[in-house]
Image (cartoon, coloured by chain):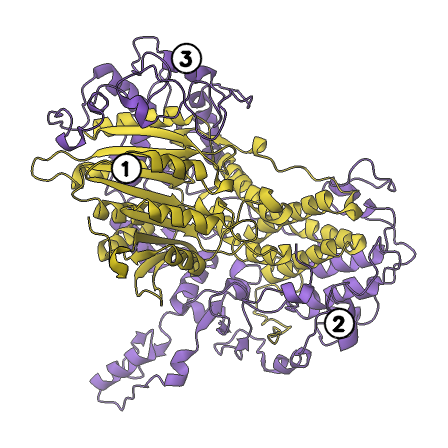
Chain colours: A purple, B yellow
Amino acid sequence: MAPVELENSSTVSGDASGVSSTGNLNPPPKKKRNLPGMPDPGAEVIALSPKTLMATNRFVCEICNKGFQRDQNLQLHRRGHNLPWKLRQRSAKDAVRKKVYVCPVSACVHHDPSRALGDLTGIKKHFCRKHGEKKYKCDKCSKKYAVHSDWKAHSKICGTKEYRCDCGTLFSRKDSFITHRAFCDVLAEESAKNQTNKLYPQPELKSPPAAAAPLTPPNVSAETEPVKIASPSVRSSSESPNPLEVIMEEAPRTIGFNVSSSVISDDDRSGNNNCTPRTIGFNVTSSGLSGDHTSNNNNNNGIYAGLFSSSTSSPSLYASSTPSTSLFAPPSSSMEPISLCLSTNPSLYVGPTTIQDPHPPPHFLTPLSLPPPQPAMSATALLQKAAQMGSTGSGGSLLRGLGIVSSTSSSMELSSHDLGLGLLPPCSSGGSGGSGLKELMMGNSCVFGPKQTTLDFLGLGRAVGNGSSNPVGGGLSALLTSIGGGGGMDVFGTAGEFPGKDIGRSL
Amino acid sequence: MNKAMILNPTRPVWPGFSSSKSLCGDANCMEQLLLHCANAIESNDATLAQQTIWVISNLASSDGDSTQRLASSLLRALISRAATRSPAFSFLSAAPVSQETLHRFSVIELASFVDLTPWHRFGFIAANAAILDAVKGYSSVHIVDLSLTHCMQIPTLIDSMATKLINKGQPPPLLKLTVVLAESPPPPLLGISYEELGLKLVSFATTRNIAMEFRIIYSSYSDGLSSLIEQLRLDPLVCNEALVVNCHMMLHYIPHETLSSSRSFFLKELRDLNPTIVTLIEEDADFTSSNFISRLRSLFNYMWIPYDTADTFLTCGSEQRQWYEADIGWRIDNVVAKEGAERVERLEPKSRWFERMREAEFTGVGFGEEVGREVKTMLEEHASGWGMKKDVDDNDDVERFVLTWKGHSVVFASAWVPISRVDGALSYIEA
């Protein structure tokens, strides 16, 4: 495997000086980085301060104190005061370079340049929504918003369109309503019982459209089920015991190969219902897949209750105060249709297909869930610890506590923590890589000499095998360097370039 | 090689916010750790692998933020790969990520599932619009639905047909739906049989006054759907019947060149059937590299999206979220830990799909403005990170749509018609 050459190690220290460390309005010097996975690897990454992001009107008229979001707008306004004004032209050079923006909150997903957002408005809105205070409240329901335009957009649709299924579920969008209706059992039973369609005004169904006549007149009629199954009766009426239903009962609750299913070929369509199952490509056997065919419907209440029951533990905009409400499940015939308490609290509209808050509540004020657990130790600290543990010749002992080691491995006894810090006492060979760890912790970079880097960065310069001579200093401390100090040494090449040639081995 | 640009090591420190050096929820840091771990596995370095696994397992979490959950899934897949492929890691035991553990959705569950985010609905809207436009005037419409979501696109198509294809007292066309049943389909798994599914669709069509037939064909993606093609060839020609092939996130299960040439071959066979329109909706990512570390990288830079969007619509710990993320985990495991014929998740980027379509003598058709508006209206009902961008391909000047999450491409939608071969001149096949 070819060691990786780092040609630009010298630039690491170069950019450090210009960083402003106080929360002022001046954006720090722009950083350049190739962004893996981003469409524009040459994009400039810009990190604005929270104050800048929250500020709406940064350009203020000196005469009347009116604020504007863009300088251009301010200039145009100044004309009205008969003040000198100047509109800047966008030079060709400026226009070309794409800018992407990162979130200043370090724990945020968008703090990382590879998750940068492509436009200024986007990052401002993101910051406001996720890390800001929600000042706007909808008067029709209880939803709160941090961004004014979000609140406005919501107010427009709050309580407007509603589509209601017979099973009681409410939808704000027609297509989700239609998709649900197609499969809703309540509906199917209704229409089967009545045999006439109550839901849509129905003009007389003409017998087969003339043009389709060539092949299969009998199958085109609305009454018979064109789907061919090797059973005499194909009507899914709830009155007669339906052999079809029987088949469904027996069928494994999976997609499998049913004895009863058949390929419907055109040959069979001459009205002959007793078609021989004909398969193409596979032998039809009943597969022994998991056949737990308890009724779906009975379980559904429980399934989605999870979405709601958490309301007791954390305040949530999505919570329903009646835990038994199940939005998604059509009740089985033995249950009463579930209806939403529409009148009591509109905020019960939960889930994707109901009138919903199109904007996610900022995590930090109204957690949809508990805040994600923070790791107990930082990456750097963990790496150090791992380095201290040194060579683990007895395979797997380091990972004992994690439950991923096979029981057949001979390993030392460990206190078993669940995914915890199953720490070994420091082993003999555990030199903590030494050189430069201290510097790393203090944030200095550039501690690695090129030689160490290229040879040991990936830990590739060593013999294959169970770390017999594990220069822990090499492999892990180099990793430490990249994480703690380098903060993102992109060893594996840059965006768009697959490191196959660097790593050498393909599969 | 490209110069590796190195990020400024000290991130700006804003008052009130903790320094990034104290914790590592940082995506970049996680990525580096995972890549190092992968490399260690690749080079059979058990020690370094163990150390990195240990570090990552302390940072990742299946209950954490989107980066942590993604890392947790990737780590599991890495361990699985090491345990199953390298003798040096025989001490590891990997909990198998098999289909048995995945949730089997009832139709109603699946119906609401596909609308939790625009991930699928985006493709449905675009494809249905293109289909409707293409089948105007036909008296019979035969749709071959190759879809990951088990016909969830069809109800709205039926509804649109019922309302938009009625012309001065003429009844709407006959609808024939052909679906493919594969032996072990990828998630999301459906909990009922396709026969049952078909029955429901047919009854629904009935309520909308559409006469409908439903047919199941057994075929396998791993052999390029050869049985499907065979059957379609055997179908008698019906006069005035449109053939529509709707490919929604399934074609990438047909192996591509590193395994076999089935993918392009299938498209060429498809072209020979002279379809009226072919819609191709796929996720825009590249998991085709034969180097698993590159694939890991691609995964990291794409699969954060489903985890991130999950945060906006699913409560942490909810069952739905578990199902959703289990499905993602299955895919990740497939890309990282499997090889050869077992590795079925072979997404390739939009540009390559378009190349294939052109090679197979298809030409692109654009979506209209109205579709764009419809998509945007739909997106407004979802979390605000969702967007849509219009994308004009250099090769054919056709404007298509791409679904985006926080600016990153997620899913692309495209529609194609065969190029006529008559007289060597290229022209579109007219209705």
Front position among marks 1 and 2: 1
The numbered dot on residue A431 is none
Which element type, helix, strand or loop, lies under badge 2?
Answer: helix
Q: What x and y, as percent, mark residue A167?
A: 31, 25
Residue with the mark numbered 2: A453
Kindly identify the residue that appears in the image at 57 percent across and 78 percent down: A20
Which residue in the rendered view is the most extreme toward the top?
A: A240
Q: Is residue A459 left or right of residue B132?
A: right
Q: What x and y, as percent, mark residue B221?
A: 48, 40
Badge 1 density bin: few <14, some 14–19, many ≥20, Cα 10 Å? many
Kindly identify the residue that appears in the image at 32 percent across and 54 percent down: A151
Residue with the mark numbered 3: A246
Q: Gap between marks 3 and 1, in whole Å?
A: 30 Å
Q: Gap between marks 3 and 2, in whole Å?
A: 68 Å
Where A121 falls versus B278 (above or below)? Answer: below
Do the residues marked 1 and 2 share a common chain? Answer: no
Residue with the mark numbered 1: B142
Which residue in the rendered view is the most extreme toward the front?
A: B423
Q: Is residue A116 left or right of residue A373?
A: left
